Image (cartoon, coloured by chain):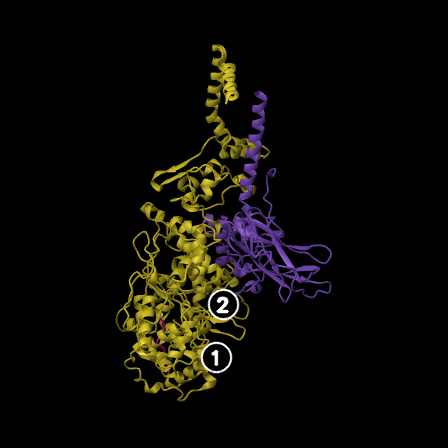
Chain colours: A yellow, B purple
Amino acid sequence: MQPIRKNISSAWHALFGDPVRAFGVVSVILLLALAIAPAKEHFSQWHSYQRHYLTLIRDRGDAISLRRRFEPGIHQIWLPELGVVDRCTTCHLGLNEASLADVSQQPFRKHPVVPHSLNGFGCVICHGGQGQATTVAEAHHSERAGEEPILPTRYIESGCGQCHQNALPGTPQLNLGRTVVARYGCVHCHAITRPDGSKVEATDHPPSLAHIADKTTREWIFSWLKDPQAYAGSTTMPNYKFSDGDASDISAYLISSSKPQAGDSAAPSAKPGTGADLAAGPSLYGESFCASCHAVQNAAGNLVGGNLGPELTRIGNKAKPEWLAAWLENPRVYDSTTPMPHYRFTPQQNATLVAFLQAKSDSDYGSGVHLDAASPQQIAHGRKLIVEFGCAACHEINGVQKPENFAPDLSTIGSKPLAQIVFLPGMEHSLPSYIAAKIRQPRAFGSSVKMPQFTLTASQTDALTTALLALTARSRSMPDNLRVAAVPETNYQPAGHAGKLIAELACFSCHRFNGRGGDMAPDLTWEGSSVQRQWLTDFLHNPNTLRPSLIRRMPRFNLSDSDNKELTDYILVVYQSSAIDADLASLATNSPDLVEHGKQLFYSKYACQSCHIVDSKADKGYIGPTLTQVGSRLTPAWVHAWLKNPQALRPGTAEPNQNLSDDDARALTAFLMSQKRPGGRGVKQ
Amino acid sequence: MKRRFTGSMTFATSAILALLSAATLAGCKHSAPANAGLKATAQGTALVESSGGHQIGATGTTLKDPLVVQVNDDQGTAVPGALVEFHGPAGVSFDPAEVLSDSSGQATTSVTLGTIAGLYQIDAVTSGKTKPVSIGILETALNYQERVGSILVERYCSRCHDSESSPERVSNYDNLEVKPHLFTDGNTLNKMSDADLTSIILHGGPALNRSALMPSYGNTLSPSDVKALIAYTRAVSDPPYQPPGTVYARK
């Protein structure tokens, strides 16, 4: 004790023994204290990055101008109306410097060209992270409450999706993700409300199970519930991983609750097997272009066909022949809103198709399934499971109500606080990795999780994660003028008998009219201005193809003459564009000289033969439709308007707008209109 | 006193430098899961690329197709059970990074590109009988603008400018009397300036005294579309495009 006290007292004496020495010592302490603040700044991370930047630009050719634009100190982008206070540019010094595009060392690289300016939007709106932070760790990796780590580049398109609810051409991943949300029916269970208040709608068509016993057997339902992908690899139905007992009980309830469809047996002409021509099956399936919507797995294991309807690889294992016959006779009897068209098959054609489809079966599928008759307790247990797992959120089921808000609302899932998430061991602590893991394997997050296992490819999972990450709280606080709304489907409904025909033939499944319908086939909103009556009548009778290279084509519906006339009249009268003057008198007469001049333009000046065929012997162009008979198909007014500006009539068409003069367009129209169908039908003098 | 201050300054400076390099390295995280359990049961003497090279993807995303290399022996026969390691530049990750070749001698991994656009060389390495064998495989990462270009190319250009057909589109290349240049044809396109490319896109082939089979897109594409097309062309060029003008010292 004594020596320490002695030491202290001698040190005190040495430092403050006399006034002059004390003054000196106090001054030194004061100066050191004053130096703390500047030293802290000098040794700060951002400061060292700025010094590093200066070293980097020193040796470059444009060092002087780069140095002139460099401002020392903390930089800040402040946009109060967007809630942006971003200091990222303090370290990311070269973002706007075009000449630094070749620098691979971060944080000095130039930002790639994007549609938004850095000063107009800042950084965190797109990239996430903490804009106000001035250290790498805090800005990029913070996990503190209310803060978010920076968004990994692979999900960067989610940033765009906060304001852009429409499909942007430059964000394929986000667009795919939104398609997945709609197509896999996520929103049947999870409601998603956009910032403008509109709801995200599903585009799948989960079948009603109210009459399921007409369609299939309990054994098939059992096998299907156990593993939907084993029946059809491409189905969007997820796997609920039911035990054998649970699947058996659910199938028992579905069969016992099913009511026979009224009028089911009212199709005596469609008894299976009568007059079936087995050899004609494949060609009838081909001619009817079933493959436009339905896929079948070929011998090599590849799916061939569209995905609008269910896969038919093993349809024979599922559908009862009498149900299939009634369905092909008129699908709207069983399901009034089905996207399947009502083909007018003859009884023999019907029988042929039923036999052809029934043969598409796999003798191994479900062969080991033998279910004993279910007891009332088992049926009741089946119903309990249906309620518990929310089956009725997608499917109509007799005796079970559609649940409301069955699963958590996902409208702001992109801002879910990390503190609310239970991460799995070994998982990266970030929202994107949580969402992706939950999509990949929902049941890994606990045995009580009801969410089923979806079958998605890696790119679909990434896309879905991107679309969900776009649903942020920030997207709701953005100013209205920055929001770009989704383009909603109109509820356009054509009127009268023709409207009924259009609904029966399910034209909307493939074609678009007045902002409603599919995108598989051309938009027909202006079809009446485009085509000639005789051609349309012939086409509806027998749709020969305009683009032979396509797999998906217009089927033949076997329309009666009166129905055909009804539909033709309606299309020609109603689907007219006011921008196209059908009576443009100057287009009516074509002198041989004008036709010859048009031919010159076609082959020499505009080289249209690179994409189109007019002379089927000499021309080879295979991109646009063949024009050998265009004079019998299109109206001169449409051809003229199309040549002047193709994109105005069909946005996104591959044909460029060549800015034709009126004279050139006139001559080309004359030449094209001279390409008539041989035989003289439809030739106008 | 003075001496000590300088000393601490040097210490602080080196600490900052260490921190800086650590921070720089943090951006180049390698995800190489330790596959301690993988033991090679055989060694090959050659590596061959099977598929998955020369792919084009967006920055930071996983390439569409997996990268497959094959391990062969002297006779060119496939060697199963050889350990293949995949390495890439900063930011590239592999799933998995180490893999044993399967029964047909093939080692498969999926590649996630880095966050900076450009060419990435992926190295596949196997231990070999006497010395390690490796091959380099090139992949391309596109930034936003280049990817917009790639989407426009798919819509307007590739049916003529790509000689390969795909299930979605039939190539028109063989039908054309004057063959268009592929977008990867660096030997031709690298010699053309941005202004020339802009001109031929805007006004068609005749603008540069070339074939009229190439139509004008000046009234169809916006100026930013044209820039995106050119950026894409430059990004996929083989051999790689070197911009003209001042050559800056590289750090």
Q: In x, y percent, where is residue B189?
A: 59, 51
Up-down: is A81 above or below A271? above
- Dot 2 or dot 1: first in sequence order is 1
Tell me if residue B42 can be seen: yes
Q: In front: B239, or A174?
A: A174
Q: CA distance from mark 2 to mark 1?
A: 48 Å
Please indicate, yes or no, whether residue A554 appears anywhere in the rendered image. Answer: no
User: A512 or A224, which lies in front?
Assistant: A224
The image's mark for residue A110 is: none
The C terminus of chain A lies in quadrant: bottom left
The mark total stands at 2
Q: Amino acid at mark 2?
A: Val
Image: magenta residue range? A339-345
Residue that badge 1 annotates: A362
Disc 1 is attached to a residue of which chain? A
Give the percent coordinates (x, y) of residue B67.
58, 59
Label 2 neighbour load within 10 Å: few <14, some 14-19, many 20+: many
Specify the subunit that label 2 lies on: A
Residue sitting at the far front: A2
